[in-house]
Image (cartoon, helix red, strand yellow):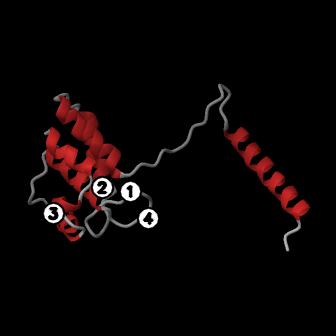
Amino acid sequence: MVNAHKFHADLQFSISRARQNLLNRQTPPGYWVGELVVDATLCADYVTFMHWAQEVDPELEAKCVRHILETQLPDGGWNIYREGPSELNATVKAYFALKLAGFSAQDPVLVRARAKALELGGVEKTNTYARLYFALL
């Protein structure tokens, strides 16, 4: 049986250590700086939005394309969390963004992505948000 007093003491100790760790990482003005790890969908969304708004910033698009390419999985798809499996909507959105950025459907990156998207169910299985992409452009 769990000793309630020991459990409470251990919990308070852990909370205190976590709090101190956060305070040690806080900058003098009061905020924290850290790496924001995002999946490819954020960049795919941004590329799609730039094209939809007809205000493409070539430098930002190139950065987004680089991130999308760097996060493609060996099986051709993209995931929605670190070390996760390929996910259909992320794969379709990344594919679409790369097409908007000028990639040919015959580019090996897109050939692999298309095969994975079809394996995962194709456009018919995408969610409403992914389908909104197609309707917007």
Residue 35 image offset from top left, x and y in percent = 51, 45
Quarter containing the C terminus = top left
User: Going 12% across and 59% down the picture, which residue do you hit?
Assistant: 107
Proximity of marks 3 and 2: CB atoms separated by less than 8 Å? no
Proximity of marks 4 and 3: CB atoms separated by less than 8 Å? no
Query: Residue at the bottom extreme?
Result: 1
* Disc on the earlier residue, 4 or 2: 4
Residue 41 against residue 136 in the figure, above or below: below
Give the residue type that dot 4 points to.
Glu
Query: Residue at the top extreme?
Result: 29
User: Going 65% across and 32% down the picture, which residue do you hit?
Assistant: 27
- Circle number at residue 80: 1
Quarter containing the N terminus = bottom right
Q: CA distance from mark 1 to mark 2?
A: 7 Å
Residue, disc 4: 83
Proximity of marks 1 and 2: CB atoms separated by less than 8 Å? yes
Q: CA distance from mark 1 to mark 4?
A: 9 Å
- Circle number at residue 108: 3
- Circle number at residue 90: 2
Residue 14 image offset from top left, x and y in percent = 78, 54
Residue 78 image offset from top left, x and y in percent = 31, 60
Residue 64 against residue 74 in the figure, above or below: above
* Disc on the earlier residue, 1 or 2: 1
**Mark 2 surroundings: few (<14), some (14-19) or many (≥20) residues within 10 A:** many
Give the residue type that dot 3 points to.
Pro
Q: CA distance from mark 4 to mark 2?
A: 14 Å
